[in-house]
Amino acid sequence: MRLIRVVISSLVVAILLSASFALAQDVQPIKIGVAVAQTSNVALFGQEQVIGAKIAEAYFNEKGGVNGRPIQLVFQDTAGDEAGAINAFQTLIADTVVGIVGPTLSQQAFAADPMAEQAGVPVLAPSNTAKGIPEVGNFIARVSAPVAVVAPNAVRAALNLDPNIKDVVVFYAQNDAFASSETTTFQSTVTNLGLNLASVQTFQTTDTDFSAQITNALALNPQLVIVSGLAADGGNLIRQLREFGYTGVIVGGNGLNTANVFPVCQQFCDGIIIAQAYSPAAESEINQTFRELYKAEQGKEPPQFSAQAFSAVQVFVEALIRLDNITKLDTLDLATQRNLLNLSVLAGGYETPLGMLSFTPTGEIVQEQFYVAQIKMNADGQTGTFEYIQ
Ligand code: 1QQ
């Protein structure tokens, strides 16, 4: 009798133990890496990405995560250069993340993405818009629409605002992969629209004095200046352009697409036209939810880089759920999880704040809606808004 009791109670203990062990295993979070710039000038974009990614983490965990398992974002600062991005990627790959959202710049992506490709870790680029990013490898996809489809919208909008535009000067940062790619699109758009590409001026993202190039440009009396650079250099260039007396229209590329540029060009940011891959006004339920969450936290409308980071996390979560519905993730080893997650990402369609998204087999984004905004500075010359004109 006593023996039976002992056997039964130890069985009960064993069952309870294994149940609680299973439970503990079930609630192990699924780690997703986020490798963006949290320091350096590139953090002017990266800060917005961190905010968007964190909103997604809280929102999707609130909704039950991946079939009851929460996701956990693991942040690694890439800072602003290639070495920083490579380090962040390698740390995340070793930290057993199932996928990586990042890096911030195309310039960094061309250096760091090959590490993820080699390790078989899926990457979703939240803001890499240069030509050739998805082609880096099978594991590389992006939620950031390429310059080729986004940038021309800004030039067309500029022409709508000022039909007298004829002569155009284009500036670009020669040492940045994104800016070099974007300027090719801008230049061909200018020519295709029958405008005169009067001059192409180059600079470096590390430059602070643009007077030589501005003097060259202004000698040609352009009615439109187009700038492809990053926020710090591009913002300074535009400020100096106005200080030198330029009064025509300015189109800025994606590198100026952040309110963090306001303190750089100050009142001279006013009027810059920038194409957008996101609009806070997009009517979908997920966008209005994201917009409310962002506004409650930040007290303003969400910017493109936050919306893209949110969307990248969302794509991973929904692709993980689809995969887990077919084969329970915790029955797969890490390499298989990463491999199948990549296939799941590419196979899906996603209703995100950016609209309905899907991917080509190479990992290029398929996105339907694009917009154009114009910067409106407040009287303080420090704060302002992106007003949508298209
Ligand atoms: C790229 C970009 C940058 C402007 C992102 C911040 O589009 O590097 O591809």
Image (spheres, rainbow, N blue to C red):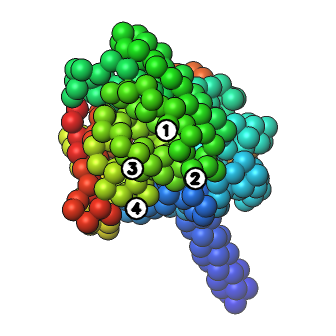
- The span from disc 2 to disc 4 (Cα, nearest Å) is 15 Å
Query: Which quarter of the rendered picture does the N terminus lie within?
Result: bottom right
Among numbered discs 3 and 4, the one appearing first in the sequence: 3
Question: In the figure, 37 relative to 234: above or below?
Answer: below
The numbered mark, 2 or 4, whose residue comes first in the sequence reads 2
Residue 85 appears at what percent x and percent y?
70, 51
> On the image, numbered disc 4 is attached to which residue?
263
In the rendered structure, which amino acid carries the disc numbered 3? Glu
Q: How many neighbours does mark 2 have within 10 angstroms: few (below 14), some (14-19), or many (20 or more)?
A: some
In three-dimensional space, the C-alpha distance between marks 3 and 2, rounded to whole angstroms, equals: 14 Å
Q: Position of residue 351 (x, y in %)?
A: 34, 37
* Residue closest to the far bottom: 2
Distance from Cα at disc 3 to Cα at disc 4: 15 Å
Task: State the image coordinates of residue 184 (x, y, percent, origin top left).
Answer: 54, 22
**Residue at image mark 2:** 208
Tell me the element at label 3. helix
Amino acid type at image mark 4: Pro
> Mark 4, residues whose alpha carbon is within 10 Å: few (<14), some, or many (≥20)?
some
Number of the front mark, 3 or 4: 3
Q: Earlier in the sequence, mark 1 or mark 2?
A: 2
For disc 3, the neighbor class at 10 Å (few under 14, some 14 to 19, many from 20) is few
The residue under label 3 is: 243
Left or right: 382 with respect to 236? left
The residue shown at (65%, 58%) is 79
Query: Which of 86 and 335 lies nearest the eye of the viewer?
Result: 86
Residue 214 is labelled as: 1
Q: Is residue 107 visible?
A: yes
Is disc 1 in contact with disc 4, using a CB cutoff of under 8 Å?
A: no
> Residue 50 placed where, x, y %?
49, 59
Task: Select label 1 or label 4 by which is in front.
Answer: 1
Residue drawn at point x = 69 percent, y = 29 percent: 136
Q: Quadrant of residue 372?
A: top left
